[in-house]
Image: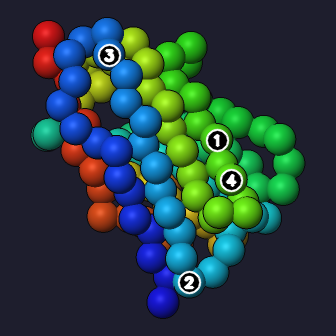
Amino acid sequence: QVQLVESGGGLVQAGGSLRLSCAASGRTFSSYAMGWFRQAPGKEREFVTVVAGAVPRWSYADSVKGRFTSSRDNAKNTLYLQMNSLKPEDTAVYYCAASTKTRYSDYADDYDYWGQGTQVTVSS
C-alpha cells in the first residue's frame, strides 16, 4: 500500500519559515515527479513546486519563487519543502504528490498519489 505522509506544518508569523516533509512508503518514486500543491479556503488546489525524477530539474509557481525551495532524498524516499519569508497569502493546506506517469509535471492530473495534507497558517 502506497502512502505519502506530510509533516512540518503549523502556525508561523509573517516573515517566518517552515520546512515540510513528505515521507513515501510502499514504493519508490526516484524516477518520477514529486511535487507540492496547496489549497486555500474557497480556492482551487494550485501547483507550488515539482522536483523531477531522475534529472536535476525544478519548477516553482511564480508566487513562491525565491522564497520556497523543494528537494528530495531518493534514498529516504522523502520530499521536502523549505518555505522562507512566509506571507499570509501562503496560508493553505499543503499536499505532497507523487507520480508514476511522468518525470516532470506541474499538472495535478499527472499525479497518482496524494498525502492527507498539512495545514500551514501564516499570521500577519
Q: In the rendered view, tell whether residue 73 sits above or below residue 98.
A: above
Q: Residue at x 28, y 50 (%)?
A: 118
Give the mark nearest the N terminus, 3 or 2: 3
Q: Residue at x 30, y 25 (%)?
A: 90
Give the mark nearest the N terminus, 3 or 4: 3
Q: Position of residue 4 (x, y in %)?
A: 45, 68
Alpha carbon of mark 4 to alpha carbon of mark 1: how far? 7 Å
Q: Give whichever of 47, 23 is nearer the camera.
A: 23
Q: Which mark is on residue 16?
A: 3
Q: Position of residue 71 (x, y in %)?
A: 64, 41
> In which quarter of the view is residue 49 placed?
top right
Q: Residue at x 65, y 63 (%)?
A: 76
> In which quarter of the view is residue 3 placed?
bottom left
Quadrant location of the C terminus in the rendered image:
top left
* Disc 3 residue crowd, few under 14, some 14–19, many 20+, Cα 10 Å: some
Badge 3 amino acid: Gly
Give the mark nearest the N terminus, 2 or 1: 2
Residue annotated with mark 4:
73
